[in-house]
Image (spheres, grey):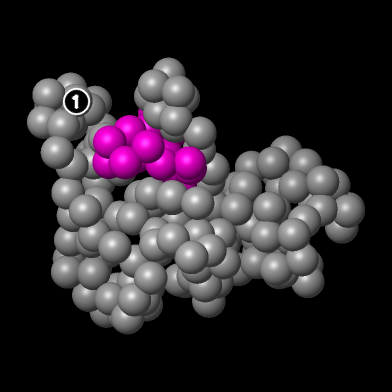
Amino acid sequence: MTVVSNSSVLIALSAIGQLELLHWLCGEDQLVIPTAVWREVVEEGEGQPGAREVRAAEWIRVEGARSHPLLHVLVAQLDRGEAEAIAVAQEVGADLLLVDEKEARRIATKLGIRLLGTVGLLLWAKKEGQLAEIRGPLEALQKRAGFRISEELYKRVLGEAKEA
């Protein structure tokens, strides 16, 4: 499975010690991250959650966006990492784009790109037996990663995971 990720998912999963879920998700293929995401997480984020983990992950491949017209349109609406993630996902024909930000998700959906966020990935991993439970990772996301999860989403995810 070809998967492209934006920064937020890498940082959040690293903060809760679950970055390996992305390795599980990608199988034999590598996770693709855009150059802007590498810069944001590893270079500018040095010392922060994700920097060391992403740098050490040999199964992560960095790739720059080639479609400059699309990228220019996207950069006018999104930050550079989100714009490159969407452009790279479209260019490589990704099976899945990992992104949390609302506007990026809206645009990716309009472009026909299948997507998943951090919470959705955790739920999928739970359903596939990669996580014993989801409540702990959700709470860690909120406490350690400062991740905002609405009460409604929290309850819905626990219900879907049969932990309500």
Relative to 117, residue 68 above or below: above
Q: Can residue 155 be seen at all in this image of the molecule? A: no
Q: Residues in magenta?
A: 88-104
User: Residue 19 in the image: x percent, y percent?
Assistant: 49, 70
Residue lying farthest to the top in this orientation: 110
Q: In the figure, residue 51 lies in which quadrant?
A: bottom left
Left or right: where 93 falls relative to 141:
left
Q: Residue at x 62, y 47 (%)?
A: 120
User: Residue 129 in the image: x percent, y percent?
Assistant: 77, 66
Q: Viewer-proximal residue, 32 or 99? A: 32
Residue that numbered label 1 is attached to = 70
Q: Viewer-proximal residue, 54 or 90? A: 90
Residue lying farthest to the front in this orientation: 28
Q: Can residue 38 be seen at all in this image of the molecule? A: yes
Left or right: where 49 falls relative to 17:
left
Q: Is residue 160 magenta?
A: no
Which amino acid type is shown beneath numbered disc 1? Leu
Q: Viewer-proximal residue, 29 or 146? A: 29
Q: Residue at x 50, y 51 (%)?
A: 1
Q: Residue at x 48, y 65 (%)?
A: 28
Relative to 36, residue 12 above or below: below
Left or right: where 129 falls relative to 96:
right
Q: Residues within 10 Å of mark 1 (few under 14, many from 20)?
A: some
Determine the secondary structure under disc 1. Answer: helix
Q: In the figure, residue 50 lies in which quadrant?
A: bottom left
Q: Is residue 90 magenta?
A: yes
User: Residue 132 in the image: x percent, y percent?
Assistant: 78, 71
Q: Residue at x 70, y 68 (%)?
A: 130
